[in-house]
Image: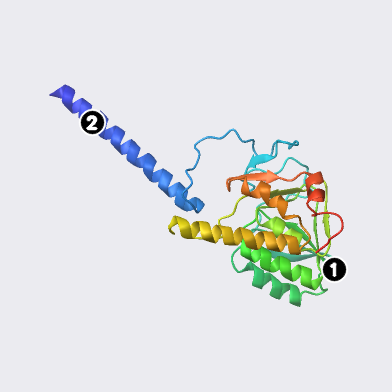
Amino acid sequence: MTGKSSVGRILTAILMFQVGIGGLLVFGDIQSGGWRLPRLWTTTPRLSEPVRPGDQRRVFDPARDRPAVQPARDPGDLPDRLVLSPQSGTTWRLEGAIAEGDGARIVAQLDKARPAPERLILQSPGGSVRDALELGRYLRTAGIATGMLAGEFCYSACPYLLAGGETRDIDPAASVGVHQHYFGENALLPAFVAVENIQRGQSEVMTYLDAMGIDPLVMQHALATPPDEIYLLLPEELERYGFVGAVDG
């Protein structure tokens, strides 16, 4: 009897462990915005490790890991939404995560800012793609340039904001990275609806990039890089895809 009880307790413990792991997997999927199974381990290097041609994918956690370059200044913890602040003359800073509603909010601030901004220095881990596109379109219409300083970063949706600059000045030691996006869709949507929404969102991004003078082929790196990783663009790629140099859009 004792042997059977022990076996029963072991089986119960194993079952509870499996249920717990299953719950964590489902929770992880919902938190990440999709039904992609989260990985319990990865061989992808950390964001702070040096980048070399052909070795450009890094674990995406800018809040914990800074890029492997010497920053112009230590930003500390970036705001959880975009913050506009004066820097020098007509140059302003725009930094922080891109939260929903930031597009319209920052546009209103730019309209009221004095002296009127002619150049924005960007630093952001990304966020809302739609707000980045909205704000990028405004920058182009208003003729505002964008730039990045050595050691600072622009990831995820931020490069789309960067692309909106009338001109773009990116220090070679700045870090620009792209990856896949969820476009804010509910993970519980039927698969065919979710795929349709993602395709529509990607199409909008590619049309936007083309209008801004950026080669949409840059999206090949974004589409091939999962949301928990980031593909870091080398200076020569930034030039090849049109982020630096003459603006055609």
Check disc 2 and report its element: helix, strand or loop.
helix
On the image, numbered disc 1 is attached to which residue?
Answer: 90
Tell which of 70 and 217 is nearer to you.
Answer: 217
Can residue 197 be seen at all in this image of the molecule?
yes
Q: Earlier in the sequence, mark 2 or mark 1?
A: 2
Horizontal side of 243 relative to 154 (left or right) equals right
Task: Give the percent coordinates (x, y) of residue 184.
Answer: 54, 60
Horizontal side of 90 relative to 182 (left or right) equals right
* Amino acid, disc 1: Thr
Placement of 49 over or under 112, stated as above or below: above
Task: Give the percent coordinates (x, y) of residue 149.
Answer: 80, 52
- Residue 9, which numbered label? 2
Horizontal side of 68 relative to 64 (left or right) equals right
Task: Give the percent coordinates (x, y) of residue 39.
Answer: 50, 39
Q: CA distance from mark 2 to mark 1?
A: 71 Å
Placement of 245 over or under 89, stated as above or below: above
Q: Describe the colour scheme in one phrase.
A: rainbow
Task: Give the percent coordinates (x, y) of residue 213.
Answer: 79, 60
- Quadrant in which residue 202 is drawn: bottom right
Residue at screen point 56% across, 35% down:
42
Residue at screen point 45% across, 55% down:
191
Check disc 1 and report its element: helix, strand or loop.
loop
Placement of 106 over or under 155, stated as above or below: below
Quadrant the N terminus occupies = top left
List the single residue furthest toward the top.
Answer: 3
Q: Residues within 10 Å of mark 2 (few under 14, many from 20)?
A: few
Q: Residues within 10 Å of mark 1 (few under 14, many from 20)?
A: some
Determine contact: label 2, label 1, CB under 8 Å.
no
Tell which of 101 and 64 is nearer to you.
Answer: 101
Horizontal side of 140 relative to 60 (left or right) equals right
